Amino acid sequence: MTHWLIAPVVLPAMLAPFIVLAARFHIGIQRVFSVAGVAALIAIAIALAWQTGDGTILLYQLGDWAAPFGIVLVGDRLATLMVLLTAVLALFVLLYAIGSKWDERGRHFHALFQFQLMGIMGAFLTGDAFNLFVFFEVMLIASYGLMIHGGGNVRLRAGVQYVLYNLLASTLFLFALGSLYAETGTLNMADLAQRVALIGEGGTAGIRVAAVLLLLVFAIKAALVPLHFWLPSSYAEAPGPVAAFFAIMTKVGAYAIIRVYTLIFPPELDATANLFDVWLMPVALLTLALGMFGVLAARKLDRLVAFAVIGSMGMVMIPVALFTHAGLTAALYYIVHSTLVGGALFLLVDLVRYSRPHLHFTTTGPVAGTALVSGLFFVAAIGMVGLPPLSGFLGKLLILDAARDHGLATVIWAVVLGTSLISLVGFARAGSTLFWKAHSVTPPEEEGDEAPKVPLPSRLTFVAVGGLLALLLAHTVFAGFAYDYLSATADQLLAPDAYLSTVLETEGKLSTPTAKDH
Amino acid sequence: MEVLVASAVGILTSAGFYLVLRLRTFPVILGMSLLTYAVNVFLFASGQLTVGSAPILRDGVAAYADPLPQALVLTAIVISFGMTAVVVMIALGSYLGADDDFVDDLANPADAPSDAEERP
């Protein structure tokens, strides 16, 4: 058993207190350690993804206790892919935060950032449902700090809403875990999978409640429609780089849904058979529609991007709700795409805000550095809307293709295509009002009064945004490779026997006596 | 005993939800605390309710209490305690800054001076 699997959790967990304790007054040292830590995380994540690339499932037993008794970390293809995605997004967000000096506007940005990384990595890697709750809380409590980083009344107000909403979600999560434990007597995911399958025809009431409660909790995290209220104002009011990093947080909800409902409550299980067709699919369609209508209705750029993120979560959940091999592949492809493009868009919102008095869609005179910002916004908007050259288009194509044989195929096609048009109109209006029409307004007469005082954003910020968009391009160009990889990931998810046997049959302290006797 | 514990969880939950829906920070935080109490009791009950049984293996004992929910509850208590402290601080900051303690958005967000403030 190697210890590398726990490194993505331990490294930020060690780095964060070090930054707080040893480097709290030296922003330069904080930056060096933070970036170095994230770079090391990327290296570790690539190594882990490489190891799991051939279908191996990595297992780490904490304290060497065998599976149902001890806590395990499990690295399969999906988990390591998400770890890698998080680490890469974190690097660019961090570069942006440094370049835009956001990290200097309050204290402990880097420490909180590392703690949040720890929570997200742990949530992806854990193989224990209660541990998932704990890592969710680690992730959230760091995000509370990041969300209100820099202060300001409106941000604090949005922060209160965000914290309270997530506290309610945590309470619900505990209720779900309690009923899960009461029904099965275990919280290890692999053990749960086996025991839930054994529950007889008559006794499914409790487990149904648990399954629906869990789905509710993850739907709150993924901002699915009736439960999405926390997202627009928190993402819009959070500091730019923080909002960009939050792009991965909704994906944690999507990941948890995929993980729990392929492993513990697979679609062929009688108790929870209708959960996807009856509940998840309509909710996903609604989320997509509402998100994109929000894009059209938004009066400020930050809200517009927040609603686009909601819509993209709907787009992710549609193929997940199909629960076929093609559907999961399409969902994973779109998750990678929407994380990168969502991050880039939030960073761009911050760049746009940088040199403007406000973000409302009213035409103001041209500002310095607009050409590059608007060009990048154009590319990112194409990605988010899903127009041909970029991976959003391929993702939507995969989703439409996966939905072809589904009973609701016409509805799905209509919603996906219709919302694409709506979001196209929304983004086009935003871009043309903010950038295009700027030259139709006569610039202020007194030169050198207001505008030239704002210096250009530093080059590092453009490197960060450009890097994310370059990755988006790579995700498009190497779509064939990505598709094969994600298709194999979906295979692994739909055949969880290897996962179960790795987790439950690896020996450790307190292994089942039968395993030792032989 | 089951009826007592179940009704305690139910009453705590409903009272908690009622307070959460009041939309002023102080009642909402109290409501959150009630909800956490409810969920803690609920977690206790998830390991079967027994009185006076041994928690760990011992000779000559037939009935055992499940020790795991107690560990879960302990974790949940610690986390919710920390979270409550955080939310109190943030709510206090928001109250002192905005001079009202409503949880929902300002009546007219257009008036909010957010963007002007956030300029570097």
Image (cartoon, helix red, strand yellow):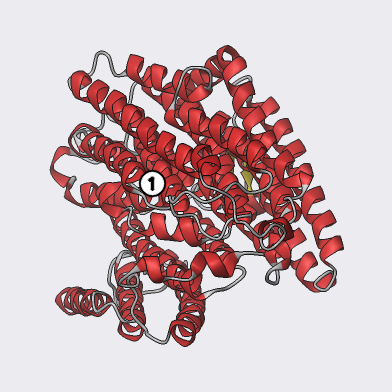
* Residue A282: percent from left, percent from top: 21, 36
Quadrant (top left, top right, bottom left, bottom right) of the C terminus of chain A: top right
Q: Is residue B64 visible?
A: no
Instruction: In this rendered view, identify the residue nearer to me: A43 or A391.
Output: A391
Write down the quadrant of residue A295 in the picture: top left
| Residue appearing at x 31%, y 75% in the figure | B35
In the picture, measured across the screen, residue A36 lies left or right of residue A80, that is right
| Residue appearing at x 49%, y 28% in the figure | A382
* Residue A119: percent from left, percent from top: 58, 55
Write down the quadrant of residue A277 in the picture: top left
Instruction: In this rendered view, identify the residue nearer to me: A112 or A178.
Output: A112
> Tag 1, which chain?
A
Quadrant (top left, top right, bottom left, bottom right) of the N terminus of chain A: top right
Q: Give above or below for B73 relative to A264.
A: below
Instruction: In this rendered view, identify the residue nearer to me: A343 or A58.
Output: A343
* Residue A452: percent from left, percent from top: 72, 56
Q: Give above or below for A133 relative to A121.
A: below
Write down the quadrant of residue A28 in the picture: bottom right
Q: Residue furthest front?
A: A445
| Residue appearing at x 76%, y 49% in the figure | A458
* Residue A270: percent from left, percent from top: 20, 33
Check disc 1 and report its element: helix, strand or loop. Answer: helix
Give the residue at mark 1. A307
